[in-house]
Image: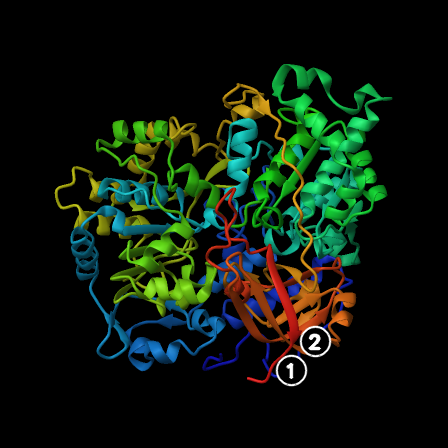
Amino acid sequence: MSGPESSSLEESAGEPSQRDYHHPAAGWGAAVSVAKVLAHQHEIPNGPKIILKMNHEDGGFDCPGCAWPDDRKGLRMDVCENGIKHSTWEMTPKRVGREFFAAHSVAELSGWSDFALEDAGRLTEPMVYDPATDHYVPISWADAFALVGRTLRGLDSPNRAAFYTSGRLGNEASFLYQWFGREYGTNNFPDCSNMCHEASGVALHASIGTNKGTVDLTDWESTEALILLGVNAASNAPRMLTYLAKAYRRGAMIVHVNPMIEAAATRTIVPHEIVDMALFQPTRTSTLNVQPRIGGDAALLRGVAKALLEAERTDPAAIDRLFLERHTQGFDEYRAACEATPWDEIVRQSGVPERQIRLVAKIYRRARAAIIGWCLGVTQQEHGVDTIREIMNVLLLRGNIGREGAGPCPIRGHSNVQGNRTCGIDHHPAEAFLDRLAAACHFTPPRDPGLDVVGTLDAMHDGGVRVFVGMGGNFALATPDRAYAFEALRRCDLTVQVSTKLNRSHLVHGKQALILPCVSRTEKDHQATGVQAITVEDSMSMVHLSIGLKEPAASTLLSEPAIIAGMARATLPDTGTPWADLVGDYDLIRDYMAHTLDGFEDFNRQVRQPLGFRIRQPARERVFLTGSGRAEFSVAPLTDVIPADGRLMLSTVRSHDQFNTTIYSEDDRYRGVKNLRTLLFMNRADMADRELAEFDPIDITSIARDGSRRTAYGYLAVAYDLPPGCAVGYMPELNVLCAIGDFSTQSRQPLMKHIAVEVTKATQR
């Protein structure tokens, strides 16, 4: 597909190429990339001034990119390349209003690239789809809300509607959104967590009684060992590089576990460290890089545990017996499982030599405090929950819970995805939360579990869900099985997308469709009592304020809370909820949140403290809210993760020049790729087995559980340092290969990083 202009920030003319990247992460490469983005969006004068206020308590806005915590010492340059790209992308002076939609039909726009759609600019006014002309046309806010209300009231059950949320939504809007949906009568709240870290929440809750990690930045600054699994920090959480560099300099051991050796696992030059920048002086960010096969992490961790238990025979300090006796349950069963798992099976399933697994165990054993972190490379697999439980088993063996410098650390990918769940965006809410919500907000919420992402897609496809409301994100591209997802959305009576920029989800719509444009996090949110602040929660449970600094892109934009309140008032004409008052003063929303959410007591005062506040984590204090009142070991057999003969295991990833489904260019600097996204990284031996040369055209066919097949045609094979049997390609393009039925039976996450494929030379098409 191609748009009306260049399909990337670079000149698109140019042959695809790939060269191994040997430079430090961040550094001057990041600085040059940022300059290009600012220039492309015509934000050279204003961009740097606004960006220097990002992530600061003195009137700055919170980065709308990743969920890495803000520096607690007030670092003046606590920004990164991707955060700047993401913010500048929304600060563009380009506008998409009624003239744009009059000039371009939906059919025409459907042929544009995803880059060209978003690059068209900021949405400026509400639009409604006109099927007679195949164009979006203007609609007033009042009429848009009336259409939503009329359609929702006309459904025979509230469960015929689903309310989706991406991680961009702030806490106040998240709380209002779930309030609206539950007052309407449904728990159908699919959200991006269903596709990214659902496995983490399930595993952590079972192990230690919380669905969040227990560490904070002070732990990162004092830990003696970091083990990171399935994390591409340089692209997905670039501010982590600062802490990796600090850890290495003070002598901490850093182990990266990933089928690909990413740039963050080598060296970095942190841009705000001026001397290092000037001298081109990098810092190492890794002690050891381990490359398991895709899906081999659980076996590797079982090997670490087995090595620790073997070491205890001669060194009682290899495990923490006192912690195990006082705070855990199931240790004896776990020991027996480790002893019963032979080393040859651990090596075969992990794809890692025994000596290297023992080296990881040695590093971990020598550290008085250790953190284990993980990201989607672990969670988006069939046995993601078992793998994270195995992470917890390894942490428990040495008492690395509830002490300084130690604990589990899920690396969240989007700025407020953790806050969404904290504030009630949950298709299966806890009874205690619903009780508090009912008491504080004076309505009776539904109690039956609702639909997650996979359940919502199935229900839309089968006619069970007739209305889809999306708060942010790009649902059509982010979800699995694109053909199925597109058809599901098109079968809806009404689709509503609340967005800042045009994307694919506006073009894959229901019989009726609304685009409702909102202010971005970089912009001032003007309400009746003045400019409002919102709050967000980072991946380490810190909650802090964010205040936009720019005037909105158009006077016709509304804030997300205002849009939610408008839909709610039109849908619930007899409501007793003071929606107008809540939108006029977000402090009132926070007062309701204080009475509903654990840890948010006295919310308005707490969040106005310097740098905000941290939500209390009982497990951090060794208070485990499990059934036994103790941290629970798990015992799961190792599963066979070796692909069948002739097949590879595919993992989808983001490129460096990408944020979720937003594509900034067709380059991937840290993997040395230029002018190409339709590629498949492969082990050289696997290419040779298929008689493939570099950049040979290939077809990639997935084999679903039900035996059905899906094919991505005309990709290019690219040799890369990967374990045999493994392949890697880009999302969202390769989401087409993940069947709707291929989700984890443990977490219901789509298996975006666990897709069995066959690769053949391209057929003529």
The answer to whether one can see residue 126 in this image is no
Tell me where residue 720 appears, x and y as whole percent. 74, 65
Looking at the image, residue 690 lies above or below residue 589: below
Crowdedness near tag 2: few (<14), some (14–19) or many (≥20) residues, C-alpha within 10 Å: some
**Residue that label 2 marks:** 17
637 or 154: which is nearer to us?
A: 637
Spatial separation of the CA atoms under disc 2 and disc 1: 9 Å
Looking at the image, residue 718 lies above or below residue 440: below
Q: How many marks?
A: 2
Whether residue 585 sits left or right of residue 730 in the image: it is left
Looking at the image, residue 490 lies above or below residue 218: below
**Residue that label 1 marks:** 14
Tell me where residue 241 appears, x and y as whole percent. 68, 49
Badge 2 vs badge 1, beta-carbon distance below 8 Å? yes
Q: Secondary structure at mark 2?
A: strand
Tell me where residue 322 appears, x and y as whole percent. 70, 15
Q: Quadrant of residue 498?
A: bottom left
The answer to whether one can see residue 735 in this image is yes
Whether residue 713 sits left or right of residue 400 in the image: it is left
311 or 110: which is nearer to us?
A: 311
Q: Quadrant of residue 316?
A: top right
